Image: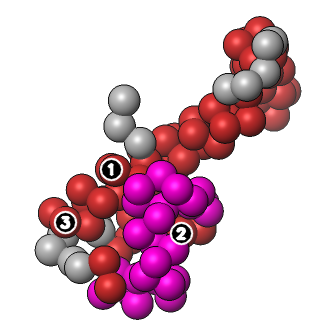
Amino acid sequence: MSTLGLKLRELREQAGLSLRKTAMQVDIDVAILSKMERGERKFSKELVLKLADLYHVNADKLIIDFLSEKVLYELEDEDFGLEALKVAEKQLKYKKNLNNE
C-alpha cells in the first residue's frame, strides 16, 4: 500500500522539483519535508493542499489519503477500531443526510 508521503514524493519528482526547492516554495524545513515523504512525520491538511497546488494536481484524492492515514493512525492499535470505524461511518452518513435536508 502506497503512503501519502510516497505519493507526494512521486508527484514532486514528476513535477521536476528538488526537495529543497519544494520546501522553500511551501515554507517548510527541508529535513521535515523529507521525513514526511518517508512517513516519519505527519502531513498537515494545509501542507497537502499547498503541495497539490504546487504540483498542479487535484487535491481531492490527496486529501482522502491524508484523512485515511489520520484515521488509521488513531485506530490501528485499538481492539475495537474496525467496529468503531463502522459506527462512525453510520454517524457520518446520518449527519450528512440531516445537513442535506
Q: Residue at x 51, y 41 (%)?
A: 64
Q: Quadrant of residue 13?
A: bottom left
Q: CA distance from mark 3 to mark 1?
A: 10 Å
Q: Which residue is mark 3?
A: 13
Colour style of the rendered protein structure: secondary structure
Q: Residue at x 24, y 56 (%)?
A: 10
Q: Which residue is mark 2?
A: 47
Q: Position of residue 93 (x, y in %)?
A: 74, 21
Q: Amino acid at mark 3?
A: Glu
The answer to whether residue 28 is magenta is yes
Mark 3 / mark 2, whichever is N-terminal: 3
User: In the rendered structure, which segment of residues is drawn in magenta?
Assistant: 21-45
* Above or below for 35 versus 31: above
Q: Nearer the viewer, residue 28 or 54?
A: 28
Q: CA distance from mark 3 to mark 2?
A: 17 Å
Q: Which residue is mark 1?
A: 7
